[in-house]
Amino acid sequence: MIKLNMQRYSDLFGKTRKDSKKYDSINATLLIKAGFIDQLSAGIYTYLPMGKKVLFNIENIVREEMDKIADEILMPSLAPKDIWEKTGRINTIDVLLKAVDAILTDSRKEYILNPSHEEIVTPLAQKYNMSYKDFPFALYQIQTKFRNEKRAKSGLLRGREFRMKDLYSFHTSRKDLNKYFEIDLKFYWNIFRKIGIEQYVVEALASGGDFTDDRSIEFQVKCDNGEDTIYHNLKTGEYFNEELINKDNITQKEYEIFKGSEAANIFKLDTKYTDAFEYTYKDKDNTKKQIYMGCYGIGISRLMGILVEIMHDDNGIIWSQNISPYDIYFITNKLDNNANTILQTIMNTNKTVLLDDREIGIGEKLKDADLVGIPIRLVLSDKSIRSGGVEFKIRNEDKTQIIPIDNIDKFLK
Amino acid sequence: MIKLNMQRYSDLFGKTRKDSKKYDSINATLLIKAGFIDQLSAGIYTYLPMGKKVLFNIENIVREEMDKIADEILMPSLAPKDIWEKTGRINTIDVLLKAVDAILTDSRKEYILNPSHEEIVTPLAQKYNMSYKDFPFALYQIQTKFRNEKRAKSGLLRGREFRMKDLYSFHTSRKDLNKYFEIDLKFYWNIFRKIGIEQYVVEALASGGDFTDDRSIEFQVKCDNGEDTIYHNLKTGEYFNEELINKDNITQKEYEIFKGSEAANIFKLDTKYTDAFEYTYKDKDNTKKQIYMGCYGIGISRLMGILVEIMHDDNGIIWSQNISPYDIYFITNKLDNNANTILQTIMNTNKTVLLDDREIGIGEKLKDADLVGIPIRLVLSDKSIRSGGVEFKIRNEDKTQIIPIDNIDKFLK
């Protein structure tokens, strides 16, 4: 059991890197240097043990909230090309990646690597839910997605392969869709609150993109390196993606303008996809009626990148408590009785700890602790013992304090 | 909280199908009819809510055991083609699926959709672990894989897209590799025990396939529809995949012959991949030395298919307790005080329940309960009340018994 709550740094796969190389973005540079991810190719990354923990922490928060309003399924990444021809999106969506090979002996069959799953979920729903009694319902998945991204240049913000949560809701009226839309908004805010970035997020109105002719809502995270420009109307309080702004008509005074990175987006698809697949339901009076759809995305790996973009300093990453790979970064130069007492207390309070047990100087360990970004740092040394205990520091604060070893459980809660 | 422990059948997405269509295999037919999976295309499936639960139950058992002997990471599905050229496997492995598209403006870039990750994990390990102090170490992932499968005709047993656990271990000597190999075997048996199929599994010697020139060990599950033929040497007790048998030399008496389906395989790769990527480590004396590798696979979605192949009867699936999507299938025609008492007891014992609350005849509900295959069935009816309580039945036994409602907690443990 102790193994899972305690990781020795000396055994960790994916240690910090000393080189001063800069990658394509702050998030890539810090995540690679701190040992969270490795770049295989532009926009394609491996999640190392600590990176996988962060990714799963985000996924589990998203899952916890989405389980309250939808059923989790898992759809495939591959789809036969003809499904994408039904909606015409094979010609309009410019990020489709195609997989082609000689699967049949006499012909090459083409598949789409789905960047989105409207084309899969609509015919799926149609197979099962045809009666008015089945509505409303909602399905979601957390899954790997692919994009034929021409410029994959922002670390986890813009990947060719990435993790995403996508949810699809089905309704018998626009009114019911609107109602679910508001519910979904509420649960999205729960997610941002749990992740610890609520204060950086705004709801911005944007275009419907490839998905719908209607407007969409984007959850934009204020972020200097964001790819979007957001206009905040100071009079109405509303936020708009630049694409909706007619620049000839506005004055600087009316708007606060800032950069944002899109962490999530939600669309009212109305009947675009249900019409394309001729998916109708049978009402009480036995007539066929139209079905209204909504879709609700959260970029999981992108969120991981955004977190680093907005929560770091010159020395490294600053993880929030619910996302951090470990609760505590514990530096000690020997595993004596004091160290063991501290470790035991950590286990008893059900916290997880990265134990930096390397035979290197304390200076290097302190640097790595800052780079890795775990919220609580403990330093046990001869000096700290002489001062009365173990040194305690919050990653995001300057203050350090000495805590009697018998007392640390009170500080770990 | 109750929502997560109790699912009303009327709200379930993926209800049983009444049609008598037969799919390409027993597992596909039963899993599709019972509402666990949906077929998008040959060898490509969606996991519906109950199917996703089964898949995750298997994954979590595998994860629990693998966490004891390796660190979890997540590698990408896409890999640039040139990585696969280094080992030459681009020409020898016949199931590579290629993704091609105009990612760069002036040329089409080709990616491989990895069916296996030796080509990814070896250079990854090389980036981080170069010193003798770093060895041995092992990395694993649970991930979606792709195969250019010419005949995808056995449901979840042979997919074009499938879930897999793959683990890779790295050693400074063949001896150390051998030692880890034995440890891995032990943890694989833990997995089969927890899944409830230990008695069907044998370790069979097989060729190394595309992976190594050495022999490999397959975990073969005795299964009438298995794709492999296994020879059991009655004198030595050893099992062999047919491919290793010289049929001219053997007599029927010496061997018991049966069909098997391969749930897992493990290979001693030795230095094949570390040589290809020139991955060596620096020993204490500062000399460069060879690194020995092993790889260890478990087909997660395939295991789900195998479970159905070996654990079903004429009426449907028979899930083992640890794998079942719910603990209890509860049939009742009204949600009265008795039903609520039973539901409350189920919640208190921390069990999960699928509540068949549909307004249909009890005959159809009993049929569906058998088809879906949840281990415990409870039937509450006027008749059961007159007999003294609720009817209790184990899916895999013929006997039914009436239990006083106050007493059911004792039967649910």
Image (tube, coloured by chain):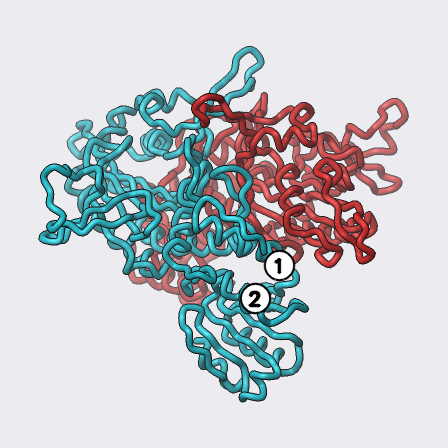
Chain colours: A red, B cyan
x and y percentages locating residue A203 in the rendered image: 75, 42
Check the image and name the residue furthest to the front: B20
x and y percentages locating residue A96 in the rendered image: 60, 27
Task: Give the position of the N terminus of chain A as an image quadrant.
Answer: bottom left
Q: Amino acid at mark 2?
A: Leu
Proximity of marks 2 and 1: CB atoms separated by less than 8 Å:
yes
Residue at numbered disc 2: B354
Quadrant of residue B361 within the rendered picture: bottom right
Q: Secondary structure at mark 2?
A: strand
Label 2: few (<14), some (14–19) or many (≥20) C-alpha neighbours in 10 Å: many
For this view, does B295 lie left or right of residue A109? left
The answer to which of B102 and B259 lies nearer the viewer is B259
Q: At x 24% / y 35%, what residue is drawn?
A: B208
Mark identifier at residue B26: none
Q: At x 77% / y 29%, what residue is drawn?
A: A242
The answer to whether residue A323 is visible is: no
The answer to which of B335 and A404 lies nearer the viewer is B335
Quadrant of residue B116 within the rendered picture: top left
The answer to whether residue B101 is visible is: yes
For this view, does A350 lie left or right of residue A306? left
Check the image and name the residue furthest to the top: B106
Q: Secondary structure at mark 1?
A: loop
Q: Chain of mark 1?
A: B
Q: At x 41% / y 57%, what residue is drawn?
A: A390
For this view, does A364 lie left or right of residue A217? left
Q: Is residue A288 above or below residue A76?
A: below
Calculate the distance from the C-alpha at mark 2 to the C-alpha at mark 1.
Answer: 9 Å
Residue at numbered disc 1: B12
Q: Amino acid at mark 1?
A: Leu
Q: At x 39% / y 45%, what residue is drawn?
A: B72
Looking at the image, tell me whether mark 2 or mark 1 is earlier in sequence order.
Answer: 1
